[in-house]
Amino acid sequence: MSISCFKICVVTGTRAEYGLLRWVMQGILASEVFDLQLIVTGMHLSPEFGFTVQEIEADGFIIDRKVEMLLSSDTPVGITKSMGLGMIGFADALVELQPDLLLVLGDRFETFAAASAALIARIPIAHCHGGELTEGAFDDSLRHSITKMAHLHFVAAEEYRQRVIQMGEHPDRVFLVGGLGVEAIKRSKLLSREEIEVHLDFKLGTRNLLITFHPVTLEQNTSAQQMGELLAALDQLPNTHFIFTMPNADTDGRVLFRMIKEFCAIRDHAKAYTSLGQLRYFSCIRYCDAVVGNSSSGLLEVPYFNIPTVNIGDRQKGRIREKSVIDCGPFKEQISTAIQKALELNLHFDSPLEVLPSSALVLNALESCCDLNLKKEFYKPL
C-alpha cells in the first residue's frame, strides 16, 4: 500500500447497496491511485437479515471496520436509536481510518448516519444515486439530505442530475454515470434454471413471480394491511409459484416478515428467503414472469430483463418508469388486475435501459476530483 494513495472509504449496510457498489469497490481496489477502505454496518452484521457480511468477505474484500448499529426493534424509537449508535460507531471508525473521501450510495438511515459523521469530521463525501424520488418513504428526505452533505454526485439519469443541480449543487460536480445495478447485471454470469433451482432448493413452476415488499415508512400502520391485500391477491392465482425476498430493516418491517413466513409455511408453491444475494436475485428475475412489490429494483434493474414489474402503492412514487412497469394501489383487486395485465404484457423490445460503464465513470470522476474544497457555494444558474 502506497502512503501517497488517496484513501477512499466505502460504507455499505445492505445487500442491495453492496451489489450496486461492488464493481466500484473492485475498481478502487485495482487502482494505482486509490486505496480502498471498507466499513460494513447495518443488516450485513445481523443474523436476522442473513449475516451478509460473509458474502462481502467471500468476494475477497478486506473489511477495515464493522459498525454495529442495528437494534432488534423496528419501531420509530428503535430506528432512531440505531441511527444514533451508527453515528457514534462511524465517528470512531473514521477517526481511526482517516480517509480522504467517504463514498456512499442511496438513501438509507445507515448511510445518513455515516455521512453525518463524515461531515463533522471534515471528510469529503461522494454520493451515488442522488436526485431520485421515493415520495412514500422517509428515505426521500434522507437521500436529499445526503446530497446537501456531499461534494461529488454520481447520478443514474439526466433528470436526476438536473434535480441535484436544482438543489444548489454545482454542475461540474454532478456526474451522469447511469445505473450501477444495470452494469452489475451485464457483468454477472447468471445461473441456469436448473442451477437456480438447486441454489434455492425450490422447484420453479410453469409460471413464477418474484415478490419484494417493504414498509411504506411515511404511512402510519399500513404495512400489515397492505401485505394482507397483496397476499390475498397472490392466493387467487392458479398454477403460480412465489419467491419472496424479505423486507429491509425498516420501521414496521417485522410484521411483514411474520406474514410472509406464515403464508409460505402452508403453501408448497411459495418460499421466502432472507437474502438471495445479487447473483441469485438477478438469476431469479431471469426465470420469473413478473416482479411484484414496491422495491426500487423493480424500476431500476428489472426492466433490463424485459420482465414486467407490478409496482404497488406510493413507496417508489416519483422515480422514472419504463413502459414495463405497471402501477397499482395497495388493494387486492387492483393488485390482481395489475398482475394479470403484467402476465399478458408482450415485452418484445430491446431493453430501454442504456448500459453505461458506470463504475469506470465513477472512478474517472474520482481521479479528476481528488482535491476537493469542503466549502460549497449554493449554485444558482444565471
Image: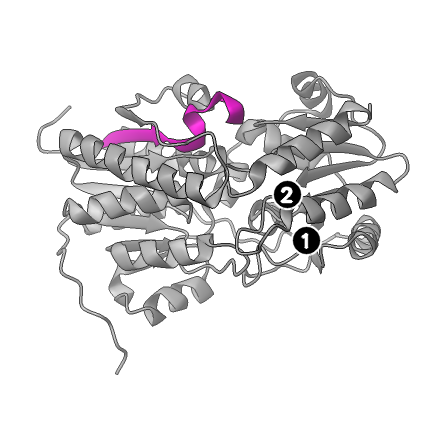
Relative to 219, is 225 on the left or the right?
right
Please tell me which residue lies in front, 82 or 204.
Answer: 82
243 shown above or below 146: above
- Cβ atoms at labels 2 and 1 below 8 Å apart: yes
Numbered range of the magenta stretch: 35-51
- The quadrant in which residue 196 appears is top right
Q: Is residue 29 magenta?
A: no
Q: Residue at x 70, y 48 (%)?
A: 225
Please tell me which residue lies in front, 293 or 224.
Answer: 224
Residue 247 in view (yes/no): no
**What is the spatial separation of the Cα atoms under label 2 and label 1, in whole angstroms?**
8 Å
Q: Secondary structure at mark 2?
A: loop
Q: Residue at x 49, y 60 (%)?
A: 133
Q: Which residue is mark 2?
A: 213
Pick out the residue farthest to the front: 77
Pick out the residue farthest to the left: 3
Q: Earlier in the sequence, mark 2 or mark 1?
A: 2
Q: Residue at x 68, y 36 (%)?
A: 286
90 shown above or below 271: below
- The quadrant in which residue 82 appears is top left
Q: Which residue is mark 1?
A: 312
